Amino acid sequence: MKSSTGTESKNPSRVFGPLNRVSRFFYEKSNLVTALLVTLVFVGYLVFFLTERGTAFEVANGSVKSLGTSLGFGQAEILAFLTERSEQMINAYINFNQVWDSLFGLIYGVMYVVWVSLLFRPYSKKVGVLNLLPFGQVVFDWLENYSLANLSNQYLSDGTISSSTAVLASTFSTIKWVFSLLVYGVILVGIVMRIVGALKSRSQH
């Protein structure tokens, strides 16, 4: 009885069942119209909401423009970023990370998932949950945002930042960008596969 229960708990279908269902949902629902619509939402949010919220903590000629847009950062960069900003600007930065940038992560995550699902739909049985890869980027983006918000709150509280949390924030940021590069690579491969498939189909006719 114990061995059978243990086997059932390790059954891949049970472990990955929810992921497979979400993956199939996107493969089934993604089409060119949906992909263009979510891309429009992405661009609109970036231009009309995110960029505007970012100006609330922008420092002209600042030594560090933004932390999350660089491939990793050190404790010195975080301190430099916070030191040259007022309490009001740091609070705006905390709000930016916890609300606006986190929502942005969800938006671009869904957009990339839709595009990958559309490109790889003919090969969905072979590639499986590959279309959910962009959500990995979203998760680490959220972890980075949470860590930076914690560091900002700590700085406002006592003027210091935790070195261990700084390392975590930098690590999350680096992993986020690694996922981003992987997603772009997957999309490029999907485009090439679709073009090759279309050319083969034409040659057969």
Image (spheres, rainbow, N blue to C red):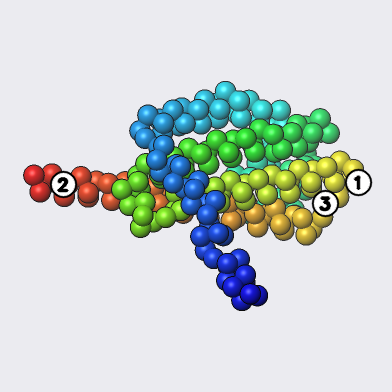
Crowdedness near tag 1: few (<14), some (14–19) or many (≥20) residues, C-alpha within 10 Å = few
Q: Which residue is mark 3?
A: 161
- From this view, report whether residue 177 is shown above or below residue 101: below
- Nearer the observer, 44 or 82: 44
Amino acid under disc 2: Ser
Percent position of residue 176, x then y: 58, 51
Disc on res. 140? none
Q: Which residue is mark 2?
A: 201
Q: Is residue 44 visible?
A: yes
Find residue 198 and report its image quarter.
top left
Q: Nearer the viewer, residue 50 or 137?
A: 137
Answer yes or no: do the residues labelled 1 and 2 have beta carbons within 8 Å?
A: no
Mark carried by residue 158: 1
Which kind of residue does numbered mark 1 sit on?
Asp
Instruction: Quadrant for the N terminus, please.
Output: bottom right
Residue 7 percent across, percent down from the top left:
57, 71
Question: Gap in Å between the C-alphas at discs 3 and 1?
Answer: 8 Å
Secondary element under disc 2, as helix, strand or loop, is helix
Indicate left or right for 182 with 123 as reference: right
